[in-house]
Image: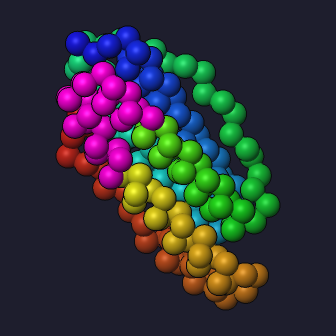
């Protein structure tokens, strides 16, 4: 049985992951509006990943005898000025999520909840990839600056991203 403290923190994390999904699909809509369909595709896949992250926590809480409480999801921004700004925002958001996952891990360690520690390790590792993915695109956009050809090529590259659902949501 999971502690009430961890249960509350995981419910808050479910909310943060669902907000991540909201943020990225809002970016998807904005990129689609700019006719940058490859960027929009990348954001769509990112939103699907975030939904998976939320549901993985959701299922875990149930498995540990905890109670899921869905909290209100904040409204994400609607416009992002330019592609670089959107990806800088995505990177900052991922850094915030990493901090939040680390705090969850600190809590599991404090409570000597070894099962939660083992479960949370997946997210610790995932966040390395989450930050690296956004960071890589920020750097490419910094190189491209306002070059339309560069933007067109990156748009084609980001169109290739495909969501591969993991075998289990547990
Ligand atoms: Fe769920 O990792 Fe991004 O936000």
Residue 41 appears in the rendering = no
Horizontal side of residue 70 vs 2, given as left or right: right
Image height of 148 relative to 92, above or below: below
- At horizontal 42% and vertical 66% (from top left) the residue drawn is 161
Q: Tell me the quarter of the image containing the N terminus.
A: top left
Q: Is residue 77 visible?
A: yes
Answer with left or right where residue 68 lies relative to residue 100.
left
Q: In front here: 91 or 105?
A: 105
Q: Residue sitting at 67 percent across and 78 percent down?
A: 142
Q: Quadrant of the C terminus?
A: top left
Tell me, yes or no, whether the highlighted magenta stretch contains residue 68.
no
Residue 64 position, x and y percent, is: 23, 18
**Where residue 163 sits in the image (x, y, percent)?**
37, 56
Give coordinates of residue 168: x percent, y percent: 21, 40
Residue at 77% across, 52% down: 79
Does the magenta stretch mainly form a helix, a strand or a loop? helix
Occupied quadrant, residue 82: bottom right
Start and end of the magenta stretch? 103-125
* Above or below 164: residue 82: below
Residue 118, by quadrant, is top left
């Amino acid at each position: 049985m999971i502690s009430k403290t961890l249960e509350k923190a995981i419910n808050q994390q479910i909310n943060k992951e669902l907000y991540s999904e909201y943020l990225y699909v809002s970016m998807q809509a904005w990129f689609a509006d700019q006719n940058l369909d490859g960027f929009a595709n990348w954001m769509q896949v990112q939103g699907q990943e975030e939904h998976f992250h939320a549901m993985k926590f959701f299922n875990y809480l149930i498995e540990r005898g905890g109670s899921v409480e869905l909290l209100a999801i904040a409204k994400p921004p609607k416009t992002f000025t330019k592609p670089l700004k959107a990806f800088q925002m995505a990177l900052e958001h991922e850094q915030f999520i990493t901090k939040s996952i680390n705090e969850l891990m600190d809590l599991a360690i404090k409570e000597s909840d070894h099962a939660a520690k083992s479960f949370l390790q997946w997210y610790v590792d995932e966040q390395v990839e989450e930050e690296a993915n956004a960071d890589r695109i920020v750097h490419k956009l910094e190189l491209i600056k306002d070059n339309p050809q560069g933007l067109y090529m990156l748009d084609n590259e980001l169109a290739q991203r495909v969501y591969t659902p993991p075998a289990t949501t547990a």
